[in-house]
Image (cartoon, rainbow, N blue to C red):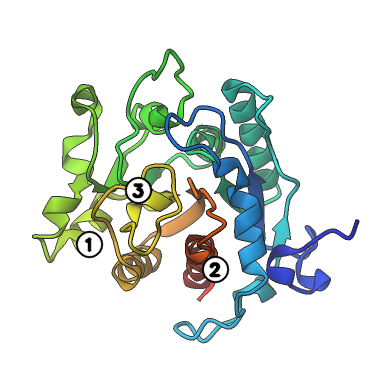
Amino acid sequence: MKKKTFAGIPKKYATLEKSQIVLIPVPYDSTETWKKGSNRGPEAFLSASEHMELYDIETDSEVYKKGIFLAAPIGNTSLSSNKMIEKVYHTTKKYLLKEKFVTLIGGEHSISIGSIRAFGEKYTDMSILHMDAHTDLRPKYNGNPYNHACSMFEASKKYPLIQIGIRSMDVLEKKYIQNENIFYFHKIYQNDSWMKEAIQRLSQNVFISIDIDVFDPSIAPSTGTPEPGGFFWYEILKFFRMVFENKKIIGFDIVELLPNKKDYSTDFLSVKLYYKLLSYKYY
């Protein structure tokens, strides 16, 4: 079977040796507690990528020419969540040691535990920019510390964790919040200077973790827990561009895409977001 490339780019831009960027698909969905199916997210993401224009108007660039290597997928539902996280950690570390710009597409949000471990070993001055409708700060959920609802707990104990777009949480998570670093959406809505304030809280090296439910479900309905409210397209792009202009982005992941056969819009939004972030990185 012919090996696909990201977005169908020519093979000369898709080899590991020639690529500056690595994309790791993690089709894993084992701990989801409501709607399952995010294990199909990477496949839907890659399928949508084949229908995307590779020229970015805003940055007047074709970032795929920096090289995007599509790694072998990690994880299946037969793996325990801690085994999956170990695999993500080791794979991410392998490509970081090759000095690649490592990105991941999930899959449920627990995949971030493994990638953040690997990035944290390479970068001492690291902060996490967590874009999500939920805080994901439970120490355990259903007895499992590697549940998707726990995806940021470990990171919160080690790094500055700047959480953007939060509009749903359990009262028990309040004690784990870094209060000065959380930007609830109802307050974002009332604060014109929130973008600058958030960027000031970040260290120089930033890993970004994006749950698709950070978007308003009217433009991104295909996710496990589509919370009312959230960001619209150009609103979030304005913020991301400012972040990339002011900080060193060391990698990012996009998670919780749950494909819907009747509506492909969220698949396409996810891959456009991915490509836009790369365009900001190399612009």
Cα separation between marks 1 and 3: 23 Å
Query: Going from the N terminus, do you reach mark 3 or mark 2 first?
Result: 3
**Which residue is most to the front?**
262
Q: Amino acid at mark 2?
A: Tyr
Q: Nearer the viewer, residue 259 or 146?
A: 259
Residue topped by disc 2 = 275
Which label sits in the foreground, 1 or 3?
A: 3
Q: Which quarter of the rendering shows the N terminus?
A: bottom right
Between 160 and 213, the one lying in front of the other is 213
Q: Position of residue 232 (x, y in %)?
A: 31, 66
Q: Amino acid at mark 1?
A: Met
**Quarter holding residue 21:** bottom right
Q: Is residue 135 left or right of residue 119?
A: left
Measuring 54% from the left and 71% from the top, which residue is drawn there?
Answer: 282
Q: Which residue is mark 3?
A: 226
- At x 47%, y 71%, the residue is 280
5 shown above or below 176: below
Q: Earlier in the sequence, mark 1 or mark 3?
A: 1
Q: Earlier in the sequence, mark 2 or mark 1?
A: 1
Please say if 3 is above or below 201. below
Q: Secondary structure at mark 3?
A: loop
- Comparing labels 2 and 1, the label whose residue is closer to the camera: 2
* Residue extending farthest left: 190
Residue 11 left/right relative to 232 = right
Q: Which residue is mark 1?
A: 195
Q: Is residue 27 above or below residue 175?
A: below
Residue 6 seen from this side: yes
Mark 1 burial class by Cα count in 10 Å: few <14, some 14-19, many 20+: some
Which is more toward the observer, 86 or 107? 107
**Percent position of residue 142, x then y:** 41, 16
